[in-house]
Image (cartoon, rainbow, N blue to C red):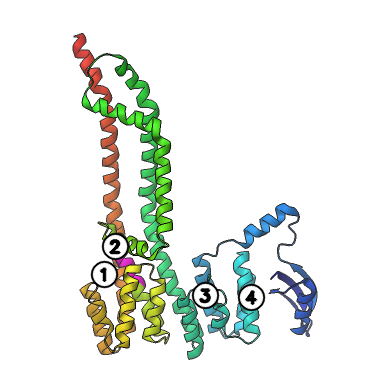
Amino acid sequence: MPVFEYTGLNNAGKTLKGILDADSAVAARQKLRGMGIFPVEVKEELSRLKGRSSTTMFTFRSLKRIKTGEIYAMTRQLSILLGAGVPLVKSLEALIAQITNPTFKKIMAQIKDSVNEGNSLASSLSQHPKVFSNFYINMVYSGEASGSLDVVLLNLAEFGERQQALRSRFKAALAYPIFMSLIGTGVLFFLITFIVPNITSIFTEMQHTLPLPTVILIEVSRLLQSYWWLLGLALVGLIVIVRRGKRRPRFLFMWDGMKLRIPVLGPIFQKIYLARFGGTLGSLLQGGVPLVSALQIVTKIIDNSQIARVIESAVDDIHAGRGLASTLSQSPWFPSMVIQMISVGEQSGELEGMLNKIAETHEREVESNIIAFTSILEPVMILFMGLIVGFVVVSILLPIFEMNQMIQ
């Protein structure tokens, strides 16, 4: 449905500006009159773009991806407005005016109209499942049911910002090593495929037995020159196989298990999932969501099928009358410290507090582990690149030394 920007006057003669969705400009004007607003100007959003190229640009901008940071920034601002006593519809109108992402702006306009028609905020959000997760919607639902929507939204924003910061730190820590490895690989590829053949061609023309390192270097150079496209094709094929394979439950289960067993990185992934598990489940329980429903939500957002299967088993055990800690203790992915904290939380009735502590503890451990990992990885990469370059240099110099000895 098209989105229209309007300028109008209310009964008191005050100028109002906003955004709404309607089938046409005429329908938008009728909708404004029904809201008690006299329309002065109504125009379709981005209608200044004309022609075929304009249509392409509009489609591109309309499909602009909504970032997680935009959602949680909006959540925090909505919490502040509601906490200040601003009505929900007015708060949504104020937020829509500040949003720059056209896709997000259109969705929030639809949510505002749905709320204005008498629907709850949670039910309005549920109409956009690709933007708002089950976790987000259930938290909003619990906040509306308890009458503390502003507090729940603030907790939701803080949780989302912590998770985003954790992912950002992990990506930022790996960005430099990945960049250096790509640059180093490119330099070595250029050196072996273009520089080395020009030098070693002198040795191959001489009918003299070459040292083993030089023979290996020449063969590797020939292989890369002749079949570099095959290596690239194999890499692309591997990426395609992994992406398609992750759509199959059995392959995805094996892939997620492999991620958790990778040396050095595996424990970091495990702590990231545990932090997400504790933080999400703790936030849902604090919001008043029942334990079984909260666990079912966690299984959909934990992003690891191995751990999700353990949580699904915990749901079945809880239905049978057993505790959460006893089920999780049978899995190798939940350490004894986590099990003990959950057990104490169940016995004391402070399970959500213990889960939040689990999340905070593992977030700190992830950060320290990432720092330690990158501090070790950088010198290892430099050493590895140095060894390869040293091998190339030695392979070139050895025949030269032998030629000098023969001349002498």
Marks 4, 3: nearer the viewer: 4
Residue at image coords 30%, 63%:
257
> Which residue is at the front of the view, 267 or 220?
220
Residue denoted by label 2: 260
User: In the rendered view, would you say 270 is above or below 154?
Assistant: above
**Circle number at residue 110:** 4
Residue at image coords 26%, 51%:
376
Separation of marks 4 and 2 at Cα, in angstroms: 41 Å
- Callout 3 crowding tier (Cα within 10 Å): few <14, some 14–19, many ≥20: many
> Which residue is at the front of the view, 378 or 83?
378
User: In the rendered view, would you say 151 is above or below 199?
Assistant: below
Q: Quadrant of the C terminus?
A: top left
Separation of marks 2 and 3 at Cα, in angstroms: 33 Å
Residue denoted by label 1: 333
Q: Main secondary structure of the magenta part?
A: helix
Marks 2, 3: nearer the viewer: 2
Mark before the other along the chain sequence, 1 or 2 = 2
Residue denoted by label 3: 75
Q: Amino acid at mark 4?
A: Gln
Q: Amino acid at mark 3?
A: Thr
